[in-house]
Amino acid sequence: DRLMSAFENTEISTFVYYPKSNRVTFSTGAQSLYGFGSEYLNAPTDIAQEIVSEDDRNSFFGMFNLIGEGAPVSVSTFHGKDSEWSCKATLTSVKNAPDGSVIEALGILENYTDVAEAISEKNLYQEELKRYLNALSCGIIQSKKSTNEVVFVNTNALNLLGYSSKQEL
């Protein structure tokens, strides 16, 4: 409880997982930023159904399963079910029973919304650039300077050289 209250006045959102009882409690920061409830008694199932996007649930459940199996650290990146946010959760075992099983694990939530948007924008830009380069009438080949590995070749370059794919170069 003291550890949770230490984070309470920071921008770090936290939660505590109690594997033996499937209970999770969330800090007020996690509640306000992501919409989590204060406590879940059937975790991680209830959390996933209420908050986590369906596409990310396997990763989310995997994070809890690894800690339950005794892993010291487990990580998941997931998106909100009905919102535009994305976060990375790191779950760390902080209290173990004499038999090694996890009694308590501390979770830290990092807001990845801006990172996820930047990656998405970068991917869109790269696809748009590839379409543009493929539409040019000249041949273009891009390679890594250090290894000479071909990383991009447009259709016209392949045609000019008599190849049908980048792998043939």
Image (cartoon, rainbow, N blue to C red):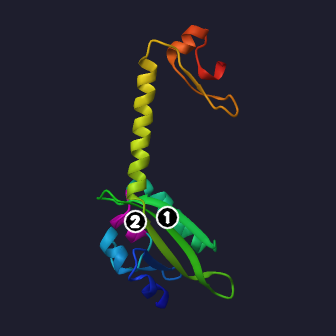
In the image, which residues are magenta?
Answer: 45-53
- In the rendered image, the quadrant that contains the C terminus is top right
* Residue 48 in the figure: left or right of residue 21: left
Q: Residue at x 38, y 56 (%)?
A: 114
Q: Is residue 101 above or below residue 146?
A: below
Q: Nearer the viewer, residue 41 or 144?
A: 144
The residue carrying mark 1 is 61
Residue 116 appears at what percent x and percent y? 41, 52
The residue carrying mark 2 is 48
Q: Is residue 97 above or below residue 44?
A: below
> Crowdedness of circle 2 by 10 Å Cα count: few (<14), some, many (20+)?
some
Is the magenta region chiefly helix, strand or loop? helix
Q: Residue at x 43, y 32 (%)?
A: 127
**How far, Cα to Cα, is label 1 from label 2?**
8 Å
Where residue 46 sits, quadrant-wise, is: bottom left
* Residue 62 in the figure: left or right of residue 96: left
Q: Nearer the viewer, residue 43 or 125?
A: 125
Where residue 71 sits, quadrant-wise, is: bottom right
The residue type indicated by label 1 comes to: Phe
Query: Is any atom of residue 101 visible in this view?
Result: yes
Where residue 24 sits, quadrant-wise, is: bottom left
> Crowdedness of circle 1 by 10 Å Cα count: few (<14), some, many (20+)?
some
The residue type indicated by label 2 comes to: Ala
Q: What secondary structure is marked by label 1? A: helix
Q: What secondary structure is marked by label 2? A: helix
Mark 1 or mark 2: name the one nearer the start of the chain.
2
Query: Is the C-beta separation of discs 1 and 2 under 8 Å?
Result: yes
Q: Residue at x 38, y 50 (%)?
A: 117
Residue 23 appears at what percent x and percent y? 45, 80
**Is residue 137 on the magenta stretch?**
no
